[in-house]
Structure formats: structure tokens, C-alpha cells
Image: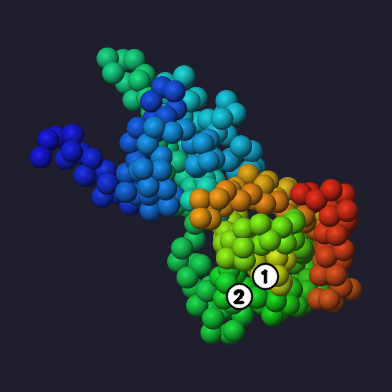
Amino acid sequence: MPQSEFFKSILDSLYDGVYFLDPDGRITYWNGGAERITGFSKADVIGKHCSEGLLLHMDPEANSLCGTGKCSALKVMRSGEPCEMELFCQHKAGYRVPIVTRVSPIRDDGEVVGAVEVFSDNTRRIEDRRRIGELEKLALLDPLTGVGNRRHALTQIEYRLAELRGEGWEFGVLFIDIDHFKEVNDTYGHEAGDVVLKALARTMRNVTRAQEAVARWGGEEFVVAIDGVRTEEEMLPVAEKLRRLIEGSVVVHLDAPIAVTVSIGATKAREDDTTETVIARADSLMYMSKEAGRNRVTIG
């Protein structure tokens, strides 16, 4: 076996994703780990830029990096200095995957001629498998999306309200609705709608912390309980991050790219709240986002 093929076989056996970029940011090599983490095959990516409907990297604050001049690989090639950071990349199925990435320059006779990026999946696989197992046992799992169902949302909020009154542990609720979801079903079919629901739920699960509750309320509506928020204003960055990650993602179904946005209502729970009142308030705020033009967050 030629030496180059030997080294490629080693790279393909790695659990981490590895890819090479030329000075223009085009992908020239893509290993098996990168395929596994992102769902994109070598044929999908070789010769292309990340911004061409592929990884569409976003930083932890949900700011787009690819094609904006903020690409970490291009910065590394300009500076010649390696870097490490946490990012979100897009999976081929349309949901967002948190990754830890390390980028280093590739040199030939001292001149930077490209970059190598090594990245690993930063999701909570073991925790998620445990959570899904528990939800299945308790009949609290939404079978389509893999997040909690309405009963799970009610149970989790009721539990948190008891903690708020007894221990002072504060939390907030996000009520999330996919904008123009009927148009997705009417245009692409209900199977495509299901794919969108699953991708959006996966993004929510990956963005929130392990202990926080994510549930499908019904149809295209979701409820998220956010722990540790002391003021309503503290909920805005969390909700905005989620909104922007969804806005910046594309689901591909039967070769058709589908982009959706969400309207979000965010409210902090109060000691005199019931499960019904806090969800109703978040729901009402979500409708205010709809009336204000959709694809936005309203807090109150």
C-alpha cells in the first residue's frame, strides 16, 4: 500500500472528524469520522466550501461563520496560528450538532498551503440515551421527534414550580412554534414535515443543557424549560440563540432544501403560577411574535 493511502486509512479509522482545506477554503479531504458526525459523504463535500449548504458553521452565540469572513480555518491560514473552539455545524439531516474543533495550518517549506480541521461530536450521547430510556418507560416520549411529549412538559414544569416555591430555584419557559408549517406540509408533503420536526427537535435537544426539559407540545409546537434564569431578560439570549440556529439550518428531503423559522414566547415562572398559567403566558407571548412578523422572540 502506498504511504499516502496508508495514512488515509489511519485517518478514516479515527472516531473524530478530519478534513483538509486548500488556501481558498475548499475541502480536499474528508475522513470517515467526518461522515459519521455530519452525515455528509466524501462525494457531498470534496471540492466544495462549507458555506455551500454543507456544515454552515455557527459560533456558540449562533453567529454564522462560513462565507462571512469569520471562518476559523481561513483565519488560521492567514495567521499561521492554530486555534480550538466550540461551534455548531449542520448535519445533513438538517439539525445542529455541537462540536469541538481544532484547526491547524498545513505548511510546505514554511509556507501555509492549507489547513487541517479535527472535530469531535460534543453532544451528550450517553445522557440522551439514558433520558430516552427513562421517558419510554414512563410513556413520556414523543415517538416522532424523540423528545418529551406534552405529559412530560406538564410533569417537568409542575416539578419546577414546586422547587421554585420551596427552594427558590428559578426557571423560565419557552413556547416555540414553527412558522408557516402548513406550507411545508402542503408544498413538500407530510413526510417532509416530519423530517423538519425531527431535525428541529434534535437541534433543541443539542442546544439545551442535559437537565433541561424539551418537549413537543403538539403539532409544530414545542415547550422548553430553562433552569437558572433570574430575570426575564436572561431568557432572551437563550431563546435568540435557538431561534438563530434554526433559522440558519436547512433540511434536505428528497433533494429539496427546506428552511424554516420559529416564533418564540419566553416567560419567567412566578411563585403564584400554575402549570397552566405559565404555559398560557408563554403561548400568548409566542402569538405576539407571530403578529409582529414571525421569526422572533417576545419575552414577558
* Picture residue at 50% right of the left edge, 42% below the top: 55
Image-based side of 70 in relation to 216, left or right: left
- Crowd around label 1: few <14 · some 14–19 · many ≥20 (10 Å): many
Label count reads 2
Q: Residue 60 appears at what percent x and percent y? A: 60, 43
In the image, residue 119 sits, relative to residue 208, either above or below, namely: above
**Viewer-proximal residue, 232 or 189?**
189
Disc 1 on helix, strand or loop?
A: strand
Amino acid type of the residue tagged 1 in the rendering = Arg
Residue 155: x %, y % from top left: 70, 79
Compared to residue 151, the image places residue 233 above or below, namely: above
Which residue does the image show at 58% across and 61% down from the upper left?
192
Is the residue 155 above or below the residue 114 in the image?
below
Of 8 and 190, nearer the camera is: 190
* Viewer-side residue, 48 vs 155: 48
Q: On the rendered image, what quadrant is the N terminus found in?
A: top left
Q: Are marks 2 and 1 in contact (CB under 8 Å)?
A: yes
Is there any visible trace of residue 254 in the rendered image?
A: yes
Image point 58% across, 68% down: which residue? 145
Residue 228's image quarter? bottom right
Q: Position of residue 139 (x, y in %)?
A: 59, 84
Q: Position of residue 124 (x, y in %)?
A: 49, 61
Residue ranking furthest to the left: 1
Q: Residues within 10 Å of mark 2 (few under 14, many from 20)?
A: many
User: Is 135 located above or below residue 9 in the figure?
Assistant: below
Circle 1 is placed at which residue position?
Answer: 216
| Residue indicated by mark 2 | 142
Q: Secondary structure at mark 2?
A: loop
